[in-house]
Image (spheres, grey):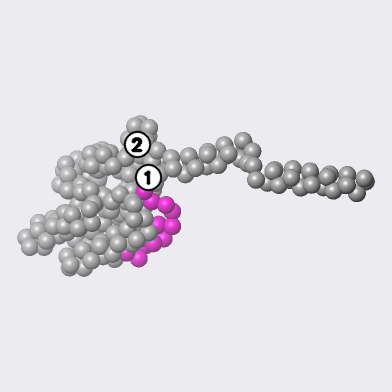
Amino acid sequence: MLNKLRIITALALTITVAGCGSQPTSNDTSEKAETKEASTANKNILVFGDSLTAGYGLDDASESYPSVLQTKIDSAKLPYTIINGGLSGETSAGGKSRIDWLLKQHIDIFVLELGANDGLRGIPVKETEQNLQTIIDHVKAKYPNAKLVMLGMQVPPNMGADYVSDFKDIFPKLAAKNNMTLVPFLLQGVGGVRALNQKDGIHPTAEGAKILANNVWQELKGLL
């Protein structure tokens, strides 16, 4: 009788332990739900570019056009965080070498602003185009569902009519090829306007950066 009682007790204990292991508590369920909700709610926008994106010459980094875009996003109560991937002096070749490091963090929207320094240095248009395509390919390979945005650039007329035209064509061409949303010219309304540029005549002032942000926002907001 004693042995029988021991067996029944052992069985009851085994069933109880097994039941505890297979049935999640309400806390476990809610924590998993919260984690899943957080992972789907927080989204990143990588703005990848040169000194224009980095906010070169501005008194405060919050005055750069990506920071102004973040303010617009926050005001609209949209769940996106902008990652400023700008680096002053960056060329398309430099961007090609740097992109994989920035792609270590999850990207939902990729905004590409590169090529201006190539144009000012007279780098062959074909080379710039190939470098930009390589950057885009890396993004698409790592995050195939990411939405892509191309910011168009132009060079001064003193670079020669053919070069100016061919350079300008890079951006809509790549945008069409890669199904990217195109901002035709990032510096629209700012380029060549002395009051909206710093003393170098190249980099926008804080007021100019706001216009750049508006140029991007007109196309970006539809993707959010």
Mark 2 and 1 residues: CB-CB less than 8 Å, in contact? yes
Q: Residue 112 or 123: which is nearer the viewer?
A: 112
Magenta segment: does it hold 177?
Answer: no
Q: Which residue is mark 2?
A: 73
x and y percent of residue 90 in the render? 30, 60
Report which quarter residue 61 is drawn in: top left
Residue drawn 30% across the image and 62% down it:
137
Label 1: few (<14), some (14–19) or many (≥20) C-alpha neighbours in 10 Å = many
Q: Which residue is mark 1?
A: 82
Q: Earlier in the sequence, mark 2 or mark 1?
A: 2
x and y percent of residue 96 in the render? 32, 64
Q: Could you tell me which secondary element the residue under label 2 belongs to? A: helix
Q: Residue 57 or 67: which is nearer the viewer?
A: 67
39 in relation to 50, above or below: above
76 in relation to 64, above or below: above
Residue drawn 70% across the image and 43% down it:
20
Residue drawn 22% across the image and 45% down it:
197
Residue drawn 44% across the image and 43% down it:
40
Amino acid under disc 2: Ile
Residue situated furthest left in the rendering:
161
Amino acid under disc 1: Ile
Label 2: few (<14), some (14–19) or many (≥20) C-alpha neighbours in 10 Å = some
